Amino acid sequence: MDDPFIQIDKAATSERLKLRERGAEQGRLEQPPTHLKTLDATEAEIVGYVLEVYARAQNDAGASIRTYDGRIAELALLGSVTSIRTSARRAAGDFNASVANAMNRLSNSRDAITSSYAELREFRLAHGLQRPAHSALSGVAAFGAIAGSWAVETIINALILRQNDAMGYLGGVIAAAVIAILNVGLAAVVGRQVWPMTVHRRSGTKVLGWSLTIAWMAIAVLWNLGAAHYRDAKVSGVDNPEVQALAMMGGGLDSIYSWGLLIAGILLAGLAALAGFRMDDPYPGYGRVWQRHEARCQEYADDVQNATEEIRDIRDEAADEAVSVQEALAGQLAERNQILSARMNFVRRFGEFGDQLEMISNGLLQDYRTANLTARSTPPPETFLTAWTLQKSVLPPSPPSAVSDADVKATEKALEEAINGISNAFDEAIARFEPLDELKRKLSDA
């Protein structure tokens, strides 16, 4: 407020109190007497009125001063600059600790990759391999191919074997499913377990693999040939077609459908065996070693990404917090200076108001005394020749601040240094997070 105190209108107050009329009336009565050493009743009334106004101003000023001081006390950050500087240094230390923990975790992952490369290298040397592992069919694709082979063979067999079956289609489906599952199941096992032995480095394993493969091929032909004869026996309507099929082994097939059943069974068995073979790298054990190696590499890449995101989040959070505190400190410092300036202006205005009241009170006394002197013939009291003095009160000084502008600037500098330190530590940490491709190149060269 430009003028927080009640101003006295001298002319209006003099008119309201009828000071000139009362002064002239008292003068004609030769009052106050010459020997009076104190203020008379009218003068006391003027002074009392002024003192009452000043007392109200004192109360208002005290309340305003307490408000100013309370607002300064609410600026909590300014009272915490020391702890803020300590927190800034601690934040930088905590960030370095987080970086160290991330490096420790990456060290374990790096050791795992080193061991994985050693395992892979030893396996390749032991088995004379220089190539990477072949891409394997996914589990869904491999098992889907095997299941599809079984389903196709079952459908084909069911259509053919249903003839002369007491259970009709159901009997044909059951017989076809049994024939197909044995045919396709054995083929899948051979493809997954036996065929890889044929490419093994050791000659004994290779010979065993080819021997088992040839044996399986013979079994597959015999099994599907038996299924074809079984179909011929069922079509002829003989009892116990299973026994008759065994008796017909070695002879020719009676129908083109039986030949189709034989060819379809062999082809689908080969497809199932191929699907089993493609489920992993063809060289025995190489696929598992390669998959473990790839999994460890992926774990390292994930660890690098997680560590980077973790320390980036810490860095961003710390930087945002520091910037927020910096802005709050600057705002509170500016607010404190504004409050102190307003408080100082208020104290000055209160002093000026006391001077104004003293001048106005003497002006009112002068109106009364001049009228009194004009109307009287006797000498006035000595008090008429002296000015009245207001006993002014002094407002309390602003509370001492334990924090100077230099302290705030030092705190802002500490926060800035903390931000820069964390940013530099982040950049150094990222540089130390060895990318997977570079790590692979080093280990491969080694």
Image: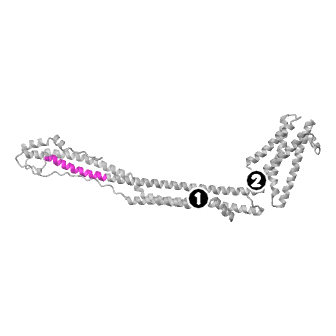
Residue at image location 74% in from the left, 52% down from the top:
136
Asked whether, in this view, residue 133 is left or right of residue 269, the answer is left
Q: Is residue 238 magenta?
A: no
Sequence-earlier tag: 2 or 1? 1
Residue at image location 48% in from the left, 59% down from the top:
418
Image coordinates for residue 1, horizontal then vertical, percent? 30, 46
Q: Is residue 357 magenta?
A: yes
121 in relation to 246, above or below:
below
How far apart marks 2 and 1 lie (CA) works out to: 35 Å
Which secondary structure type mostly characterizes the magenta part of the structure? helix
Asked whether, in this view, residue 306 is left or right of residue 259, the answer is left
The image shows a total of numbered marks equal to 2
Q: Residues within 10 Å of mark 2 (few under 14, many from 20)?
A: many
Mark 2 lies on a secondary structure that is loop
Asked whether, in this view, residue 352 is left or right of residue 84, the answer is left
Q: Amino acid at mark 2?
A: Asp
Q: Quadrant of residue 196?
A: bottom right
Image coordinates for residue 143, horizontal then vertical, percent? 76, 46
Report which residue position mark 1 lands on: 102
Residue at image location 74% in from the left, 48% down from the top:
139
Asked whether, in this view, residue 337 is left or right of residue 172, the answer is left
Report which residue position mark 2 lands on: 280
Q: Amino acid at mark 1?
A: Ala
Mark 1 lies on a secondary structure that is helix
Image coordinates for residue 33, horizontal then vertical, percent? 7, 47
Residue farthest along the bottom direction in this orientation: 446
Whether residue 64 is visible: yes
Q: Residues within 10 Å of mark 1 (few under 14, many from 20)?
A: many
Whether residue 90 is visible: no
The range drawn in magenta is 343-366
> 169 or 160, which is in the foreground?
160
